[in-house]
């Protein structure tokens, strides 16, 4: 074993993928998010992927209680959390058991030997201690008794062993920060703020963090291991912050409220992975935001519809099971032709499914999951930061067209983070809502604008506009209840035409990467954006004729999509479901699009899409 | 209307919409509608600020017939729409119209939560102990043994007592009246409208088609004196048929039960009879459960208990946050750690 040089001659890496894995009580999410925070401040581009169990505290030491956080950072464009980790931190045997297979051959493996007890090994399913049986020889192993060193570091603060051990994640963070040339000050500031009222805890955590960092500086690590540096990325100039999809979504809704000059009223019911949007908005009451935690999913959407009728920007946030419960009320909003934003942060289904895992399997539910012919607008965010803009887009469409809009994100976007260039409100277009105030003789609640087919938003409290609306079919010419057969036909066609017409207000579909014609088009939507982009770029760098189209508007599709689809010999559609967008494309355009499906509760790896591109290009004549 | 124009005194006509009423002839809903249309002008209600919001069922067609703002929503969910609307515009005077099926069966959850939150709306529950619009199935208030299309051998469901459910959910204003008793129903609407918080009014309503006479044991004119106890705050709980003995309610302190006593018998005088106190919640529970033949049914305001209205508290929290917190979205987007890329 060589002695590590203290001169800190660091090897430069273009990008690194680190996965922190441990027991769900080990604080891996905090460790990962603090590493992310510091890395963002260092100027790297990055993407993260937290992956945690549904159980809040699964029994300690079990494989199903393992919580992970993966970060991909680099000096080049980073679009995904990385296919396979270069570095795996395994705080206990269960974390090793569940994550080792993903580690790249020759990858760095940091283990906390103190947790590799007989009992923990058995719980994880190891017959022999992998640290001793040579099974880890393919990796660069850093095996340290992190527990013991943490206890020693926090000893001056007089904590019991149990409390002292809570700081072991910070010791580990300190070491990893040092390995990649990162400072610990931002984490110190965070700990002081978080534990301001418990100075002893704050100090103990800071001591553990610094001890881990100092260990790296002074101790001997095995040959060939670190330290490294990852230079700053060349991002476009501007002011940046780190942002998760759910925060971006909440802030986008607040921005939309100001751009439309409407009060934001959120009706919501807690559900993973959407709850943090409710939490964020509950903290933004100073912007005039009203949040209502309803008694159930149905009441949440009904309150939002009631708010919309009253002249607010009515929003409900949920996940797939919640959308199922809300279906009838969303159908009412279709019938009432009121603005409504339904945010579906998708998770694995059906039923309760995989609550903390990501999936894109609510697309057909969003587009078609209601009784009757009940069209509404469906749009989807592509990245965590894009959630901000798509929240505004949802509000714009809802208000301009008097229609419910379903905004799809997913668990990966919700919890994943990326550096985000902060926009200025002054650069975002306004879309002020119009409430009629001067009554005309011919007023009725279902008279329509010629261009958008939107009906007037006459709100209760306005003298002269008293009217009755409801879920029964309306007469096209008076807005009164009508059971007339021809009228129902006409109204159904009108509702469909209104939603189809939204495409007139949306820019033509663009090609994300590559040319508008060629051999292969990869069509995606939602959070697969990053992985598809990277895979298409790689394929193009190898000289392949591949382009990428990414859909943000799904119902209706943006204009020009059909021409693009017909400009390629073959079309593939990667989705984290069993084939949904591909069905819609095939039925709408009669194109022979081929599905590429991953239904594992995990995002696509770039390599998986590359493989799909290669096999689609095979036998292409 | 220009400011110089004298304020026009509104009449029943101003609250009557141009829509044809589609209830069955003889339906108790006609009487309730007429009482509402007559009552609102007397309290200076503004049609533009008045909203009738309903679920699904016969009673839920009510909003179409009022010349105010009206919202005919989906089955059971009217309280949730009303809550969202009230949070958006607390100045609106909102009436939630529901029935025993809509409000107590499919919408039981929303009813309970609106009551406990104390949202400032009036909720009128038309109780005819039957499903009307779906053609006569038994409802959550139908009595055991009721034969209906879905209970050909007789219902075996234990019924719920709406007033007790409301009290149990924490309602602060609970009243009861009868469809055809306009002189009692109208003032009850007025009291409910004045109350800040959810006012729950159960109206005993007759469905002449599917459950005719469901309330005859209460409303039968020949015996109504002894089958109804019309409560008045601060007044003794007296009742009795015309010409018959005067009766009253007395508390049996050892068993916490009410008993009917006859004045003049066994030395009973008016002093022995309970005085109605609208703020007494335990007494409201005792009164709410009474029904003939052993007791009269209690009509009027069973409970009136002042408490903060939910919507007012929500607005207060938002206003207070506005005065203290951030209001600039640009500042929000830049809060916390940021960095500049040159």
Image: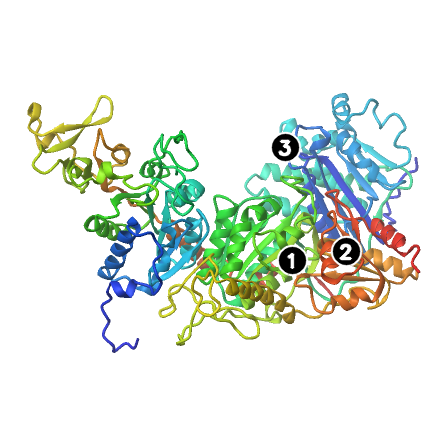
Query: Chain under label 1?
Result: A
Residue B168 seen anywhere in this rendered image of the structure = yes
Label 2 – label 1 distance at C-alpha = 14 Å
Would you say A298 lies left or right of A159 here? left
- Report the residue marked by disc 2: A530
Say yes or no: labels 2 and 1 on the same chain.
Answer: yes
Measuring 30% from the left and 52% from the top, which residue is drawn there?
Answer: B25
Q: Position of residue A534 (x, y in %)?
A: 82, 56
- Quadrant in the picture for the N terminus of chain B: bottom left
Which image quadrant is residue A380 in? bottom right
The mark nearer the N terminus, 2 or 1, is 1
SS class, disc 3: loop
- Report the residue marked by disc 3: A57
Q: Position of residue A510 (x, y in %)?
A: 75, 67
Measuring 63% from the left and 47% from the top, which residue is drawn there?
Answer: A190
Label 3 – label 2 distance at C-alpha = 32 Å
Foreground tag (1 vs 3): 1
Label 1 – label 3 distance at C-alpha = 30 Å
- Quadrant in the picture for the C terminus of chain B: bottom right
Residue A290 seen anywhere in this rendered image of the structure = no
- Report the residue marked by disc 1: A387
The mark nearer the N terminus, 1 or 3, is 3
């Amino acid at each position: 074993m060589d002695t590590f040089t203290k001169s800190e001659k660091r090897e430069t890496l273009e990008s690194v993928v680190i996965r922190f894995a441990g027991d769900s009580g080990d604080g891996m999410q905090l460790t990962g998010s603090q590493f992310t925070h510091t890395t963002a401040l260092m100027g790297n581009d990055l993407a993260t992927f937290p992956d945690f169990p549904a159980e809040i505290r699964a029994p300690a030491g079990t494989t199903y209680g393992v919580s992970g956080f993966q970060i991909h950072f680099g000096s080049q464009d980073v679009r995904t959390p990385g296919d396979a980790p270069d570095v795996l931190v395994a705080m206990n045997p269960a974390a090793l058991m569940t994550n080792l297979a993903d580690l790249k051959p020759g990858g760095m493996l940091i283990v906390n030997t103190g947790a590799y007890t007989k009992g923990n090994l058995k719980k994880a399913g190891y017959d022999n201690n992998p640290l001793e049986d040579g099974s880890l020889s393919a990796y660069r192993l850093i095996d340290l008794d992190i527990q013991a060193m943490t206890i020693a570091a926090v000893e001056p603060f007089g904590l019991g062993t149990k409390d002292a051990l809570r700081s072991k994640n910070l010791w580990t963070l300190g070491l990893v920060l040092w390995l990649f040339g990162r400072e610990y000050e931002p984490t110190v500031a965070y700990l002081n703020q978080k534990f301001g009222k418990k100075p002893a805890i704050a100090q103990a955590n800071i001591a553990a963090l610094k001890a881990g960092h100092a260990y790296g500086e002074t101790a001997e690590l095995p040959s060939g291991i670190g330290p490294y540096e990852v230079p700053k990325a060349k991002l476009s100039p501007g002011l940046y912050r780190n942002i998760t999809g759910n925060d971006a979504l909440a802030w986008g809704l607040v921005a939309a409220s100001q751009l439309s000059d409407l009060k934001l009223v959120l009706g919501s019911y807690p559900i993973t992975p959407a709850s943090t949007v409710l939490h964020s908005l509950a903290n933004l009451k100073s912007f005039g935001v009203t949040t209502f935690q309803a008694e159930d999913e149905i009441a949440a959407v009904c309150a939002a519809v009631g708010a919309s009728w009253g002249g607010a920007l009515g929003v409900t946030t949920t996940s797939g099971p919640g959308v199922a419960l809300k279906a009838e009320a969303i159908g009412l909003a279709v019938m009432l032709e009121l603005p409504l934003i339904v945010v579906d942060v998708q998770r694995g289904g059906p039923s309760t499914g995989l609550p903390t895992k990501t999936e894109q399997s609510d697309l057909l539910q969003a587009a078609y999951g209601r009784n009757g012919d009940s069209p509404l607008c469906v749009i989807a965010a592509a990245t965590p930061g894009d959630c901000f803009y798509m929240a505004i887009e949802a509000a714009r469409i809802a208000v301009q067209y008097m229609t419910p809009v379903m905004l799809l994100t997913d668990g990966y976007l919700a919890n994943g983070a990326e550096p985000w260039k902060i926009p200025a409100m002054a650069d975002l277009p306004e879309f002020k809502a119009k409430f009629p105030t001067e009554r005309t003789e011919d007023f009725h609640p279902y008279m329509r604008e010629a261009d958008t087919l939107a009906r007037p938003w006459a709100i209760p409290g306005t003298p002269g506009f008293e009217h009755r609306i409801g879920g029964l079919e309306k007469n096209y010419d008076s807005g009164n209840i009508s059971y007339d057969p021809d009228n129902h036909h006409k109204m159904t066609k009108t509702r469909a035409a209104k939603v189809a017409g939204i495409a007139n207000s949306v820019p033509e579909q663009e090609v994300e990467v590559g040319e508008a014609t060629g051999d292969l088009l990869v069509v995606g939507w939602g959070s697969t954006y990053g992985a598809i982009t990277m895979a298409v770029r790689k394929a193009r760098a190898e000289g392949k004729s591949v382009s990428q189209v990414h859909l943000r508007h799904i119902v209706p599709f943006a204009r020009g999509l059909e021409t693009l689809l017909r400009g390629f010999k073959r079309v593939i559609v990667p989705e984290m479901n069993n084939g949904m967008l591909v069905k819609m494309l095939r039925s709408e355009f009669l194109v022979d699009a081929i599905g590429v499906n991953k239904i594992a509760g995990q995002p696509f790896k770039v390599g998986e899409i590359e493989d799909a591109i290669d096999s689609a290009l095979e036998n292409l004549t | 209307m220009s400011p110089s124009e004298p304020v026009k005194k509104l009449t029943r006509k101003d609250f009557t919409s141009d829509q044809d009423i589609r209830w069955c002839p003889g339906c108790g809903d006609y009487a309730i509608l007429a009482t509402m249309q007559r009552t609102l002008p007397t309290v200076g209600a503004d049609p533009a600020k008045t909203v009738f919001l309903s679920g699904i069922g016969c009673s839920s067609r009510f909003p179409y017939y009022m010349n105010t703002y009206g919202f005919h929503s989906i089955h059971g969910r009217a309280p949730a729409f009303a809550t969202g609307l009230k949070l958006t515009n607390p100045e609106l005077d909102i009436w939630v119209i529901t029935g025993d099926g809509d409000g107590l069966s499919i919408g039981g959850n929303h009813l309970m939560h609106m009551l406990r939150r104390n949202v400032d709306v009036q909720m009128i529950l038309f109780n005819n102990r039957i499903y009307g619009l779906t053609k006569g199935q038994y409802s959550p208030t139908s009595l055991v043994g009721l034969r209906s299309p879905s209970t050909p051998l007789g219902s075996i469901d234990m019924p719920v007592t709406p007033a007790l459910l409301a009290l149990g959910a924490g309602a602060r204003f609970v009243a009861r009246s009868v469809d055809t008793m306009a002189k009692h129903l109208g003032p009850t609407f007025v009291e409910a409208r004045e109350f800040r918080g959810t006012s729950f009014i159960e109206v005993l309503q007759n469905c002449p088609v599917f459950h005719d006479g469901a309330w005859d044991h209460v409303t039968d004119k020949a015996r109504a004196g002894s089958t109804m106890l019309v409560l008045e705050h601060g007044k003794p709980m007296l009742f009795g048929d015309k010409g018959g003995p005067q009766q009253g309610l007395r508390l049996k302190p050892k068993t916490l039960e009410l008993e009917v006593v006859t004045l003049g018998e066994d030395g009973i005088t008016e002093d022995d009879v309970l005085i109605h106190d609208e703020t007494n919640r335990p007494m409201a529970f005792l009164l709410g459960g009474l029904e003939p033949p052993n007791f009269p049914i209690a009509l009027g305001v069973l409970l009136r208990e002042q408490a903060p209205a939910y919507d007012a508290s929500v607005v207060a929290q938002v206003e207070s946050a506005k005065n203290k917190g951030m209001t600039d979205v640009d500042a929000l987007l830049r809060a916390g750690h940021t960095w500049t890329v040159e």
